[in-house]
Amino acid sequence: MAIFSVYVVNKAGGLIYQLDNYAPRAEGEKTFSYPLDLLLKLHDERVLVAFGQRDGIRGIKFVVLADPRQGGIDSLLRKIYEIYSDFALKNPFYSLEMPIRCELFDQNLKLALEVAEKAGTFGPGS
């Protein structure tokens, strides 16, 4: 299961944070020669889009793109809100509606995504 991306959108609809979490793993170094042998395949991959908006911060939206089989997306959205309020809003150098540039926010968000991917859900105590 995978969580592909996390976005934070402000009241005006501007993107203030983006994290691309999923990167396909390369099996090895590939070399190409001319002419290229290309084979196009049709893939039916669906993506679950989950939106979250908390009452404490009006207008801020959290968007998670994930595999449809990924469980615990609602809990993950609550955790992202908690990380946002702890590490972005409490940062004295952060202004509301501006892009989020905080290393602690990045680190804790990546950690929360790792936990969500491994466990599938967040418990009430996480």
Image (cartoon, rainbow, N blue to C red):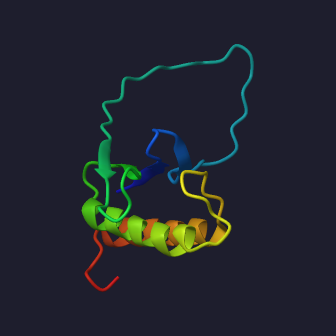
Q: Name the residue: 64% across, 65% down.
A: 102
Q: How many marks?
A: 0
* Viewport quadrant of the C terminus: bottom left
Residue 80 percent coordinates (x, y): 41, 65
**Viewed as shown, does residue 65 lie left or right of 75?**
right
Work out whether 123 lies above or below 15.
below
Q: Nearer the viewer, residue 126 or 21?
A: 126
Q: Name the residue: 26% across, 79% down.
A: 123
Work out whether 84 lies above or below 17.
below
Furthest residue toward bottom: 125
* Viewport quadrant of the N terminus: bottom left
Q: Nearer the viewer, residue 118 or 18?
A: 18
Question: Would residue 71 be visible to someone looking at this image?
Answer: no
Residue 38 percent coordinates (x, y): 56, 19
Work out whether 121 lies above or below 16.
below
Question: In which quadrant of the rendered view does residue 77 lie?
Answer: bottom left
Question: Would residue 96 be visible to someone looking at this image?
Answer: yes
Residue 14 percent coordinates (x, y): 51, 40
